[in-house]
Image (tube, grey):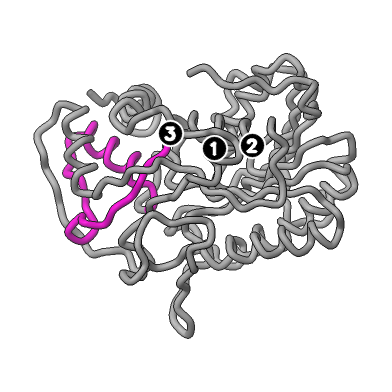
């Protein structure tokens, strides 16, 4: 895929990525190191969910530095130094199984971690970008019509068990808006909707439906579907996400919260059928209980980013799945041995 280029005229030469060894972060690192005018890329990651393997082939680039550090530690502010033009906060624990086991850490990375990253941005007079999530909309309210715009009300149930990931991302958005305004930091909040592609975690049990379906299918296992599979999602390829981010940066869009995603949805049952078709395997589904935090619908309204940056995704789901499955076929060998 041909990406837009960042040049010195865009005013971005040195970038810090919190969570740069994760799925999305590692793709952004690879993109940045492919730009000749980028002079420095610093990845700050504690490798709880990210992995150095995602940076394979990049570590020999002398523009890349990797700092093994938790961004909730106040010392990170002094350790990273100055000279940065852009701070990207992608650090998070996104898999439900992981954040249920580590709820406090999930909350802190979006609260204390966000505060530290904003302070780094303030000291550097850098732009700050917080990666939120479509999950901030909360549980689906049937009275609300899809797609979700940036101003669609969030529905988070009180006095019941809640997702620390959702609450953390909501807090991170508020921290970004209020602290950046107070400190005079230029900021941008983006809400990705179900991004997928190579480098996704293959060892999850729930929370990453595309890698789960792909690996189960490649291993000849039934595809496990939560509930009846009628819940709908839209899936956006990571390359489209990067093009969206770059489009916003090149146009110097600031002070906005912006949805990024694919504007058409598919039911989980139909996704299972599509994965089976792409893999050329017979449909073999196993129906299990729904996850308690799982919403019925996630479909973005991308009108705002289209208006501000002229962006729309170009990779359809079938094409994206073909690319992703080819990666799983190769990388899955390390975890599962030979797969078809």
Quadrant in the picture for residue 237: top left
Tell me what residue is drawn at x 39 percent, y 68 percent.
Answer: 139
Task: State the residue position of label 1.
Answer: 24
Tell me what residue is drawn at x 34 percent, y 30 percent.
Answer: 316
Q: Nearer the viewer, mark 3 or mark 1?
A: 3
Task: State the residue position of label 2.
Answer: 248
Neighbour tally class for label 2: few under 14, some 14-19, many 20 plus, Cα within 10 Å? many
> Mark 1 or mark 3, which is nearer the start of the sequence?
1
> Mark 2 or mark 3, which is nearer the start of the sequence?
3
Q: Is residue 231 left or right of residue 97?
A: left
Label 3 SS: strand
> Mark 2 or mark 1, which is nearer the start of the sequence?
1
Q: Which mark is residue 160?
A: none
Q: Is residue 9 visible?
A: yes
Label 2 SS: helix
Which stretch did the figure color magenta? 207-236
Q: CA distance from mark 3 to mark 1?
A: 10 Å
Q: Which mark is residue 237?
A: 3
Q: CA distance from mark 3 to mark 2?
A: 17 Å
Q: Position of residue 53 (x, y in %)?
A: 55, 29
Q: Position of residue 318 (x, y in %)?
A: 28, 29
Q: From the image, which quarter does the C terminus lie in?
A: top left
Between residues 66 and 26, which one lies in front from this camera angle? Answer: 26
Quadrant in the picture for residue 41: top right
Q: Position of residue 120 (x, y in %)?
A: 83, 48
Label 1 SS: helix
């Amino acid at each position: 895929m041909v990406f837009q280029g960042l040049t010195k005229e865009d005013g971005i030469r040195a970038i810090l990525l919190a969570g740069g060894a994760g799925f999305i972060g590692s793709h952004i690192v690879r993109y940045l190191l492919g730009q000749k005018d980028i002079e420095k890329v610093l990845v700050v990651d504690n490798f709880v969910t990210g992995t150095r393997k995602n940076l394979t082939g990049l570590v020999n680039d002398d523009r890349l530095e990797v700092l093994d550090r938790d961004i909730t530690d106040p010392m990170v502010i002094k350790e990273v130094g100055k000279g940065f033009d852009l701070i990207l906060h992608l650090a998070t624990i996104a898999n439900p199984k992981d954040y249920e086991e580590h709820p406090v850490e999930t909350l802190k990375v979006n609260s204390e971690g966000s505060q530290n990253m904003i302070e780094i941005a303030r000291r550097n007079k850098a732009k700050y970008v917080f990666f939120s999530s479509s999950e901030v909309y909360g549980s689906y309210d049937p009275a609300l019509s899809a797609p979700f715009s940036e101003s669609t009300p969030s529905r988070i149930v009180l006095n019941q068990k809640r997702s620390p990931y959702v609450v953390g991302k909501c807090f991170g958005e508020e921290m970004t808006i209020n602290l950046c305004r107070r400190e005079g930091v230029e900021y941008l909040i983006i809400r990705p909707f179900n991004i997928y592609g190579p480098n996704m975690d293959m060892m999850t049990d729930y929370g990453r439906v595309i890698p789960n379906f792909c690996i189960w299918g490649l291993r000849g296992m039934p595809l496990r579907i939560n509930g009846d599979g009628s819940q709908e999602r839209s899936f956006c390829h990571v390359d489209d996400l990067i093009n969206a981010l770059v489009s916003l940066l090149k146009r110097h869009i600031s002070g906005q919260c912006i949805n990024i995603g694919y504007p058409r949805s598919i039911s989980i049952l139909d996704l299972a059928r599509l994965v089976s078709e792409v893999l050329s395997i017979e449909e073999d589904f196993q129906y299990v209980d729904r996850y308690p935090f799982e919403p019925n619908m996630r479909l973005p309204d991308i009108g705002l980013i289209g208006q501000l940056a002229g962006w729309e995704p170009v990779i359809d789901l079938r094409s994206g799945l073909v690319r992703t499955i080819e990666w799983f076929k190769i990388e899955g060998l390390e975890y599962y041995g030979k797969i078809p």
